[in-house]
Image: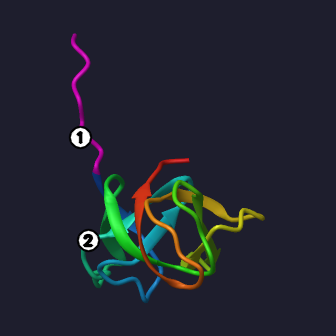
Amino acid sequence: MLNEIYSPGRRLPVAVPAGVVSGDPVVVGSIVGVAQINRTADGVVTIDTQGVYELTVTGAITLGAPVYAVVAAGLVTSLTATVGTNTRFGTCYGAQGSTGKMPVKIIQP
């Protein structure tokens, strides 16, 4: 029997807490992505796990720097260049001196 691909895996349905809307960064376990739809009544969103998205990054950051997600109660509260105990989310494709929207390439940890 041949191994058959279940799904290319780029877009995945995942359960998330209330408050997640389309365009939000999402972290579920070790999977990171951007919500493609608002959270449904049954608590699910579809996330895109690849690509480059314009997202708000808190604080100064340089081109090519890692971007980390700050997660509280299952929700991503911000994206930052500070590693600490945060989850790797992607790589910055720009530079800024303070908080603002930046292109971020999603990188699976």
Q: Main secondary structure of the magenta part?
A: loop
Residue 92 image position (x, y, % from top left): 49, 61
Identified at 62% across, 76% down, the residue is: 60
Are there few (<14), some (14-19), or many (20+) residues within 10 Å of tag 2? some
Secondary element at tag 2: loop
Residue at image position (51%, 65%) is 27
The residue that disc 2 covers is 36
Q: Position of residue 107 (x, y in %)?
A: 47, 50
Residue 105 x/y as whole percent:
41, 56
Task: Give the label on residue 18, or none.
Answer: none
**Residue at the spot 48% in from the left edge and 80% down from the top edge:** 17
Measure how far apart labels 1 and 2 are at the Cα level. Answer: 17 Å
| Residue 60 lies within the magenta run | no
Q: Nearer the viewer, mark 1 or mark 2?
A: 2
Identify the secondary structure beneath mark 1.
loop
Give the residue at mark 1: 7
Between residues 105 and 44, which one lies in front from this camera angle? 105
At label 2, the amino acid type is Gln
The residue stretch that appears in magenta: 1-10
